[in-house]
Amino acid sequence: PDEDGSADLKYVTQVARDCGKYMDDYTLVVTKSTVPVGTSIKVKNAIQEELAKRNVNIEFDVASNPEFLKEGAAIDDFLKPDRIVVGIESARAEELLSNLYKPFTLNGHPIIFMDIVSAEMTKYAANSMLATKISFINDIANLCEIVGADINYVRKGIGSDGRIGNKFIYPGIGLLTKTQNIGVKILGNIIYSYSRQSGKEVVARSKYQVLGVNLNLSDYTVKMDIKQIAES
C-alpha cells in the first residue's frame, strides 16, 4: 500500500484491461490477490471499457476468491483449506467455481459462496482479527508485568475458552506478517474513506475503536490503550 494505506491497483487494472482486449468467448475473471473492497467493480469496468473499444459484446463474470495462507504453511493451507471463500454475482460463475473446487469439497473442505463485496471484506476482516489478537495479548503481557501477573497462566486461562481459542495469543515481539500488516493498513484506509464518503462520523482520523482495540491511523498498528485500562 501507499503511505496513506491506499492500495496501488494499476497492475490489477492492467490485467483486467488485457482480459478485455483478448477475450473472444465467455470468460470468468477471478481475483485472487488481496485487494480493497470494491476492486471487483473497477475490474469489471476496465474489462467492459476494452470490449466497448473493440465494439464487441462478450459475456463475462468477475469473481473474488481470496487466499487464506499462513507464512510457512502455504502449500498445506492450499491443499487443506479451513474454508474456501468465493464471491460471485451469477449462477454461471458459481457453477464453474463449484466444479473447480469439487476435489476439495469432496474431502470435506467447505466452500462458502457470497456476494463479491463480502468476499473482499472477509479477507481484510480475517487479517485484522488475527492482528488484533497478536496486539491484544502483547499488551496484556505488558499489563501483567505492571500488576505482577504471569502472562502464561493468563494465556492458558483465556485460551481454554472455546470462544477465544489458544491460537495467536502467544506474547512475543509482536511483528505482524507482511500480509497482516498490509491488510490492517488498507482496512484503515477503507474505513476512513467510506466514512468520509458517507458523511457519517463513524471514524475519527487519529484513531477508532474496533472491539475495544484502537487502530492508530498514524502508524497503522493495532493497539490497546493500557493507560486507559489502568485508570479505569
Image (cartoon, rainbow, N blue to C red):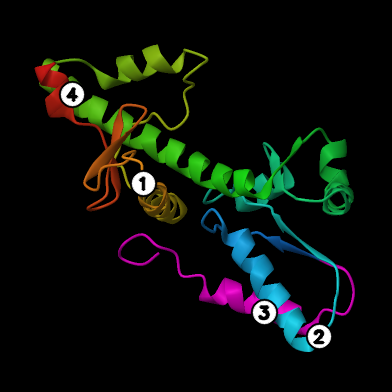
User: Upstream in the sequence, badge 2 or badge 3?
Assistant: 3
Name the amino acid type tagged 1.
Answer: Gly
Residue 15 at x, y percent in the picture = 65, 76
Q: Please give the residue where the numbered disc 1 appears in the rendered image.
A: 199
User: Upstream in the sequence, badge 4 or badge 1?
Assistant: 4
Q: Secondary structure at mark 1?
A: loop
Q: Are marks 4 and 1 in contact (CB under 8 Å)?
A: no
Identify the image quadrant of the C terminus: top left
| Nearer to us in this view, 78 or 68 | 68
Mark 2 vs mark 1, CA separation in Å: 39 Å
Look at the picture and state if 76 lies above or below 230.
below
Q: Please give the residue where the numbered disc 4 appears in the rendered image.
A: 143
Q: How many marks?
A: 4
Name the amino acid type tagged 4.
Answer: Leu
User: Upstream in the sequence, badge 2 or badge 4?
Assistant: 2
Q: Please give the residue where the numbered disc 3 appears in the rendered image.
A: 17
